[in-house]
Image: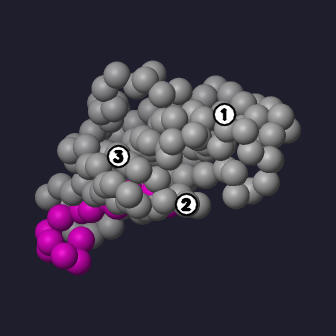
Amino acid sequence: MQAWRTAAAASMAVLALVGGTSPAGAVGDPSAPATVPEGRDAGGGSVDAGKSGSDADASAVIRCEGQVQRPHNSTHVPGTVNVVVTVSCTAPVPEITTRAALYKNGQLVNQSTLRTQRNTRSAQNNAAVRCSPGTYRGWMYFKVVFPPGYRPPTSSANALGQEVSISC
């Protein structure tokens, strides 16, 4: 377990340094920034929790990974641009909260409400705007509440998706 704790602490410190993970409670307002965050490459965030007092085997760790899908012309609501964000965990957790946001030409144009899904191993959310030609990019925030006995009990991350040129 000590090896897992050391590895988990090191990876969480690196993610926190590059803006991928925030300790529980560090995010007061999980709203998207007004402009695309600088110095961030596209990619998903991830969070881990380990079960207290267990051996360092893989079953003692729950990992949840976020993904920001590519913005696209919506097929469900014609005339809009949509971005979908997803979270996938290696085991069921009591709660996953997500927020999706959409940027056009580097400026925030819309964000979803916070959506909480309970007793699940996956979650999703989306943000959409009326289509106008431009360069779009998605962003996500997610927070996971881990089962009792896992440490940390909660963790959150945010991620930025790829930039996509869209014409209507």
Q: Residues within 10 Å of mark 2 (few under 14, many from 20)?
A: some
Q: Position of residue 46 (x, y in %)?
A: 57, 46
Residue at position x 68%, y 28% in the image: 13
Mark 3 belongs to which amino acid?
A: Thr
27, 119: nearer the viewer: 119
Tell me which segment is drawn in magenta. Answer: 74-88
User: Which circle, 2 or 1, is nearer the viewer?
Assistant: 2
Q: Residue at x 23, y 77 (%)?
A: 75
Q: Residue 145: horizontal and vertical position, in percent? A: 44, 42
Residue pointed to by mark 3? 97
Examine the image and state in which quarter residue 73 appears. Answer: bottom left
Q: CA distance from mark 1 to mark 3?
A: 19 Å
Going by the numbered disc 2, the residue's amino acid type is: Ala
Residue 12 disc label: 1
Query: 159 or 8, which lies in front?
Result: 8
SS under mark 1? helix
Secondary structure at numbered mark 2? strand
In this picture, residue 14 sits left or right of residue 107:
right
**Circle nearer the N terminus (2, 3):** 2
Label the magenta part by its dominant secondary structure: strand
Of the numbered discs 2 and 1, the one sitting upstream in the chain is 1
The residue lying at 21 percent from left, 44 percent from top is 113
Q: Distance between the Cα atoms at labels 2 and 3?
A: 16 Å
